[in-house]
Image: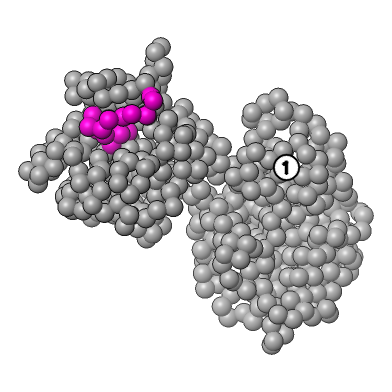
Amino acid sequence: MRHDKQRALEPIEFVQMLHAVDDFYGQPFTLLDWQHQILWDVYGTVKEDGYRQYRFAYLEIPKKNGKTSLIAALALYHLVCDPAGGQIYCCAADRGQAELVYKAALGMIEQEPEFDDVLKVLDSRKEIKNLHTGTMLKVLSAEAYTKHGINPTVVIFDELHAQPSRDLWDVMTFGAGAARKEPLWWVITTAGDDPDRKSIGWEIHEYARKVRDGEIHDPHWYVKIYGIQEEAEDVDIFDEALWYRVNPSLGHTISIEALRQEALLARNSESAERLFRWLRLNQWISQKRTGWQPLSLWDKTTGDWGRADLVGKKCYPGIDLSSTTDLTGVVYLFPPQDGFDDWRFIMEAWIPEDSMKERVRRDGVPYDRWVNQKYLHATPGEVVDYDFVEAQLLAANSTYEIPAAGTDPWNSRMLSQRLMRGGMEIVEIQQNMKNMSPAMKMIEHLMKTGRMTHEKHPVGRWCWGNVVIAVDGNENIKPMKNKSKERIDLTVALINAMATAMLFEDMDEGFVYNQRGMLSLLD
């Protein structure tokens, strides 16, 4: 890749002819070093034919670092300087957010008399038009957009992490700009509050991070991320040197005194610390805690083995059947045995196909993507077809050594009878504290001591993060299906699997629960 100095200087010089807005209204727009470098790279890096190398420019940065003003200035650059017939779109989760860039651009326009005969503001349509070239800038939001007539030259996504679904992203990127010589997508965002890792913001963040780290080769992406890693729980968040590293505008658009005050609050409040990590250090939040265990425990116990390592091994399936439109989950739990010395589990899940698209739209959960990725199976009809579940379990009975499978007796008697006719022993696990608490505490104990691992499985992770529990006076626990806001089926299946295993295995773990105490599962 080569660099064209003149192409880089054009937007840099244009932006610095503008005047700033908000707290700096009326002052010359002076690019900070980090802003200058990004524009130098994005606009100056060209291919052999002279067109821009980068089609996607991804900037992730904490709040209050001046990203909105920067992207508004760049929107004006394209509006004024691009060839005739350009289409520039400012996209955001809702109309209010989408208008922030638009309003910042208006603030810059009103300070420049030279624009009076060039730009026409159509405020009722939230549109600005170049009268000489016909290029227009328009606001779009996830709340209201149309595919009609979209052929963008520049697309600006502000706060991509807040998008309620992937719809607007897909419309504005898939095939869009194909007829343009050098279309450009700017993604300027902060980290997201997305513990379930199911948003389009997280998906694009991960893609960009992998490009930055060299895990993915994509010469069309430019990536700049300021912030601490999502898994960096042990980092000293009160280190002021860290604040300066992840906030490149610190001392300019945000004061060190303001951060010190917020840090003081973060020292004394878990919720304030969470906000400080998220908004000031740009850390993707993965600290979602429910009544049971955090997602960080799940993430730390992902195994580096594959399913092929488990063929022929002993395991205990746990089954959680859905009632109507819910998920059905099966977890295969493998105790330590010849070949490995830890507990391992793998997962299968099913969803009814007919209601899936509506649930993706309504719930914002990417069931369709999980189906495409083979983490979730869609069965025909409006309810899960248990024939598919039965076939999978009977096939597993030939693949693994299965002493018994555990299931919730509610709604499962017919399937249990069919499985028993197929040669599988079934144990009914009553869904109460007496029977579920020992299994849950054993799972917790094994995972926290590093003696239980699982395959990578986003549906399983999602279910794990959704669990809400009930606790009695003796500290017994059980999952509360009616209080958990999202599906927990695979977690319940895991508990049923462990409860079954504890009936048959010698649980010599130095732990309070043993076989004798678990015989009550059949009571």
Q: Determine whether 74 is above or below 95 in the image.
A: below
Asked if the stretch drawn in magenta spans residue 510, the answer is yes
What colouring method underlies this structural image?
one colour
Q: Residue at x 80, y 31 (%)?
A: 261
Q: Circle 1: is it few (<14), some (14-19), or many (20+) Cα within 10 Å?
A: many
> Which quarter of the rendered picture does the N terminus lie within?
bottom right
In terms of secondary structure, where does tag 1 sit?
helix
Q: Residue at x 18, y 39 (%)?
A: 403
The residue carrying mark 1 is 280
The residue furthest left is 421
Q: Residue at x 72, y 42 (%)?
A: 280
Q: Position of residue 399 (x, y in %)?
A: 21, 53
Range drawn in magenta: 495-511
Front residue of 137 and 291 = 291
Q: Determine whether 523 is above or below 322 in the image.
A: above
Is 477 situated left or right of 112 in this image? left
Front residue of 11 and 113 = 11
Q: Position of residue 270 (x, y in %)?
A: 64, 28
Q: Position of residue 174 (x, y in %)?
A: 51, 69
> Which quarter of the rendered picture does the C terminus lie within?
top left
Q: Position of residue 59 (x, y in %)?
A: 69, 59
Front residue of 128 and 238 = 238
Q: Residue at x 86, y 55 (%)?
A: 20
